[in-house]
Amino acid sequence: QVQLVESGGGSVQPGGSLRLSCTASGLTFSSYAMQWYRRPPGKELVLVASINNNFGTTDYLDSVKGRFTISRDNAKNTVYLQMHSLKPEDAAVYYCKAHRGMTEYWGRGTQVTVSS
């Protein structure tokens, strides 16, 4: 059974930092591309960052470039999202997704709140 479990969410003040983690089990992690999505309150799901499984190539939503960094540790079956200089508009439930071809798996999400 495949499981993706996110952690590291919480409440921070604007300008603060958080590191999200997503640990996978039940799949060959190194063969999957990994992505972080977020859903702000009352809004659509948005792709925030992605990292492929070949060369670790990354891509980011324009509004988070320079502030967020996605990385992966295949030995730990874990993908990370380091977030700096957080803004109120970054507040959302963050989800990780593993995908390979037409196959995809989602975690249940972790809440990030940014407020003073």
Image: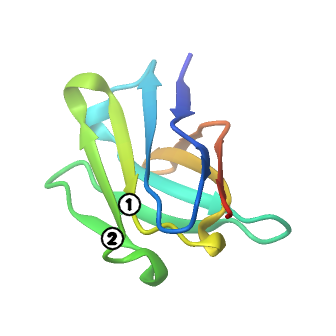
At horizontal 53% and vertical 30% (from top left) the residue drawn is: 4
Name of the residue lying farthest toward the front = 116
Quarter of the picture containing the C terminus is bottom right
Left or right: where 4 falls relative to 35 = right
Classify mark 1: helix, strand or loop: strand
Measuring from the top left, give residue 78's x and y in whole percent: 35, 32
Q: Kindly report the distance in space between the C-alpha atoms of the residues bearing marks 1 and 2.
A: 5 Å
Q: Secondary structure at mark 2?
A: strand
Say whether marks 1 and 2 touch (CB < 8 Å).
yes
In this picture, residue 94 sits left or right of residue 99: right
**Residue 15 percent coordinates (x, y):** 47, 68
For disc 1, the neighbor class at 10 Å (few under 14, some 14 to 19, many from 20) is many
Amino acid at dot 2: Asp
Q: In this figure, what is the number of numbered marks?
A: 2
Per the image, the residue denoted by label 1 is 50
Spot occupied by residue 66 in the image (x, y as percentages of width and height): 31, 76
Give the residue at x 36% y 77%: 65
Image quarter for residue 52?
A: bottom left
- Image quadrant in which the N terminus is located: top right
Q: Which residue is mark 2?
A: 59
In x, y percent, where is residue 27?
41, 24
At label 1, which amino acid type do we have?
Ser
**Closer to the camera in the image, 19 or 16:** 16
- Position above or below: 89 against 4: below
Q: Can you say whether 54 is above or below 8 in the image?
A: below
**Tag shown at residue 31:** none
Task: Specify which label sits upstream in the sequence, 1 or 2.
Answer: 1
Q: Residues within 10 Å of mark 2 (few under 14, many from 20)?
A: some
Instruction: Classify 57 as above or below 2.
Output: below
Residue at coordinates 23% horizontally, 32% vertically from top-left?
74
Residue at 56 percent of width and 58 percent of height: 37
